[in-house]
Image: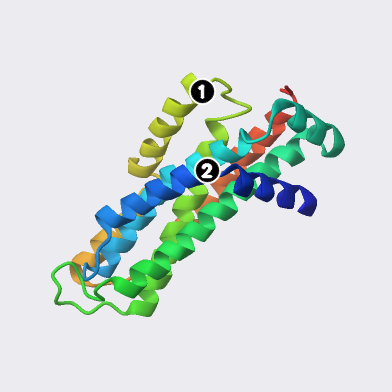
């Protein structure tokens, strides 16, 4: 598995297909996160913007290989392992973005609530922001796994499905992504920090289930 992960990471880096989602996220951050803004609000924005970007990175990774190369790798290591390595590579890239964005927000934001009066402890706020960003990266990965190969092969179906699913997961009231982002925004109103690990655990379970389904189908739908 380690060799497959190195192979997928090399494919991603050399293809430069990571550049558009990276630029999109940088644009989101430039527009929505500015120096001196309340730290919890900025963490909420940065986390929410990461979810569709994570889904896009999954699409990049699972469609990166030429068909012949994918078939050779699947024959050598098994289709589900190859697919899992691609998804995990995308998740790793999303997690790196999540941690980088968290560091940027913590470094430039105002450690006060949205009224700029209530003091917000920066350490716990950064912990909550990290949990939120990782949860959104996980759920974006789950969305990407279900809305691309091997479940949806046609670009005409995969792309709009990914966009729609990303927004549904982000705004649905029962979604862990909605819970962590709403927790940040509501906490900013009164300067309180709630580092809730339950939404993160829920995001991990849902993403694991989505990836398991995609990997299982990859073994049945070759080519």
Mark 1 and mark 2 in contact? Answer it, CB < 8 Å: no
Is 152 in front, or is 21?
Answer: 21
Q: Which mark is residue 155?
A: 1
Residue located at (30% from left, 72% from top): 108
In this picture, residue 124 sits left or right of residue 208: left
Whether residue 125 is visible to the viewer of this picture, yes or no, is yes
Residue 170 occupies quadrant: top left
> Residue shown at 40%/40% (left/top)?
169
Residue 52 percent coordinates (x, y):
42, 42
Q: Position of residue 157 (x, y in %)?
A: 48, 21
- Vertical placement of residue 133 versus 58, above or below: below
What is the crowding at mark 2: few (fewer than 14 residues within 10 Å), some, or many (at least 20)?
many
The residue wearing badge 2 is 57
> At 41% across and 48% down in the image, what residue appears?
23
User: On the picture, is 194 further left or further right than 10?
Assistant: left
Can you say whether 29 is above or below 85 in the image? below
- How many other residues sit within 10 Å of disc 1, few (<14), some (14-19) or many (≥20)? few
Query: How many marks can you see?
Result: 2
Front residue of 149/200: it is 149
Task: Identify the residue at horizontal 72%, vertical 22% (top origin).
Answer: 223
Q: Position of residue 216 (x, y in %)?
A: 71, 32
Q: Position of residue 65 (x, y in %)?
A: 68, 34
């Amino acid at each position: 598995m380690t060799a497959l992960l190195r192979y997928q990471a090399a494919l991603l880096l050399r293809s430069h297909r990571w550049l558009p989602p990276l630029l999109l996220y940088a644009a989101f951050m430039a527009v929505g996160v500015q120096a001196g803004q309340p730290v919890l609000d900025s963490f909420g924005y940065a986390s929410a913007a990461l979810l569709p970007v994570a889904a896009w990175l999954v699409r990049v990774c699972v469609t990166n290989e030429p068909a012949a190369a994918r078939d050779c790798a699947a024959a050598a290591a098994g289709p589900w392992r190859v697919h899992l390595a691609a998804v995990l590579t995308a998740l790793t890239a999303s997690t790196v973005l999540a941690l980088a964005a968290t560091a940027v927000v913590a470094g430039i934001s105002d450690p006060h609530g949205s009224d700029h009066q209530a003091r917000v402890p920066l350490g716990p706020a950064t912990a909550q922001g990290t949990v939120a960003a990782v949860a959104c990266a996980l759920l974006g990965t789950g969305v990407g796994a279900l809305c691309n190969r091997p479940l949806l092969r046609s670009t005409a179906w995969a792309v709009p499905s990914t966009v729609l699913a990303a927004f549904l997961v982000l705004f649905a009231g029962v979604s862990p992504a909605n819970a962590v982002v709403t927790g940040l925004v509501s906490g900013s109103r009164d300067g309180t920090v709630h580092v809730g690990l339950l939404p993160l655990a829920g995001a991990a379970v849902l993403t694991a289930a989505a990836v398991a389904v995609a990997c299982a189908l990859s073994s049945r739908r070759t080519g």
